[in-house]
Amino acid sequence: MPAGSPELLQLLESQGAISKPPAPPQLTPIGQHVLAELTVRASRTDPLPLDTVATELAATTAELDAVAKSAEYFLAELGALTPAEAAPFLRVVAAGLANRRETAEELAERFRNVWGMVEVMGGDARDRLLAAELLAASPEIATRVYPNLVQTSDRIREQFGSKATSVGLAAILHLVPSATPEAPFDEWVRHREEVGADEAAAWVAGLVLRDPGAWTRFRARREALAALYPGARGLPLAAALLAELGAAGEATASEIPALADSLGTTVPLPVLSATLLLSRHALSASELTDWVRKAERIALQRQLAPSALERAALAIALVHGLPANRFAGAPINSERAASPTSTLLVLHSGIYRSILASRATSPQPAPAG
């Protein structure tokens, strides 16, 4: 519709976006808000009718709030079973459960059952919580993998000492990127020193088990990220995520700098956070950042976490959890999708742990990369 046409002016007036006659057309506060919303997502929404964009914005915001409300429920329902030292990590677990968009009561019961399975395995409760989260993401195979997982955990303790984060590592070896009864233990041991982060190395070992070319992709992606962001934390996990995406990882990698810069230091591990968001959504940096900011405000209203960085991490989880087909006009590439367990590992061990590690008063697993 041509700019300034009577039809367009009438539409804007009906929406309260511009002043009505006899005054000359001027943007109202509503109009300024609409203009800001359109500007940050212009590359996608310019061809779309204004009503379509407005409806999508409202529906997506409502969906983010509904998922945050579910996270509230999980925090209340599961808080009693989590030991005090692991309780802060339950916030990101709750967000991951809420993103499943399944019946909340059934999910909570499933998690209780899985927690009972890992609680008897000993070690740090924070480490067991990661294992429970990964097992809860694969309920149909949890009981089948569990005996092997116990054996792998014992093997890690025997080889690397009782202080090793054996339960979580065993869960990664068996469940990331997908379930396998035989853990790639030797592959993990072979690569752990070069990768420099045990949990990222366990993920890479799982990738190599399924595709030997994943090791070459991982090294290439990590070297490229290290050249752009020397000393940045989270690069091994980011490189593993890009390696898992295969051919789609190249396009995803090219978009990371713009989004990492746009997110800035108000989010934890901006390079890893950008990589995770782009692993699902082919949206512009300005739009993804805008959705993260909206989700942060929702996390604050829902009182999901006490600090701004924790709320930012949960916002990243909520935005990543939105279906890719939620956004009209955005390209949808089925290859741009990491496995659910890989996503949980990035959120829990990388992004969220990086916030809490410095606050712990007792030893805990180090950030995974």
Image (cartoon, rainbow, N blue to C red):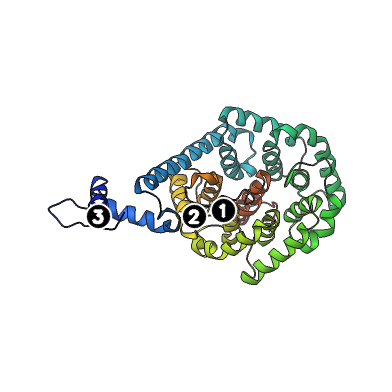
Q: Position of residue 172 (x, y in %)?
A: 74, 46
Marks 1 and 3, the one that precedes in the sequence: 3
Q: Residue at 28% across / 51% down in the picture?
A: 30
Mark 2 and mark 1 in contact (Cβ < 8 Å)?
yes
Going 61% across and 42% down the picture, which residue do you hit? 93
Q: Which element is circle 1 on?
A: helix
Front residue of 183 and 250: 250
Name the image quarter holding the N terminus: bottom left
10 Å neighbourhood of mark 3: few (<14), some, or many (≥20)?
few
As rendered, which of 149 and 318 lies closer to the eye?
318
Spatial distance from mark 1 to mark 2, Cα to Cα?
8 Å
Residue sticking out furthest to the left:
22
Q: Mark 1 and 3 residues: CB-CB less than 8 Å, in contact?
A: no
Please say if the residues under marks 3 and 2 sit with CB atoms less than 8 Å apart: no
Decide which of 153, 38 is in the foreground and name it. Answer: 38
CA gap between label 1 and label 3 equals: 39 Å
Indicate which label's residue lies in the foreground, 1 or 3: 3
Please, what is the three-letter code of the amino acid marked with disc 2? Leu
In this picture, is 47 found above or below 123?
below
Q: Tag on residue 5? A: 3
What residue would you read off at disc 2? 288
Q: Which element type, helix, strand or loop, lies under badge 3? A: loop
Residue 334 picture location, percent across and down: 62, 48
Three-letter amino acid code of the residue under disc 3: Ser
Query: Percent position (x, y) of residue 103?
Result: 57, 29
Q: Which residue is mark 1?
A: 277
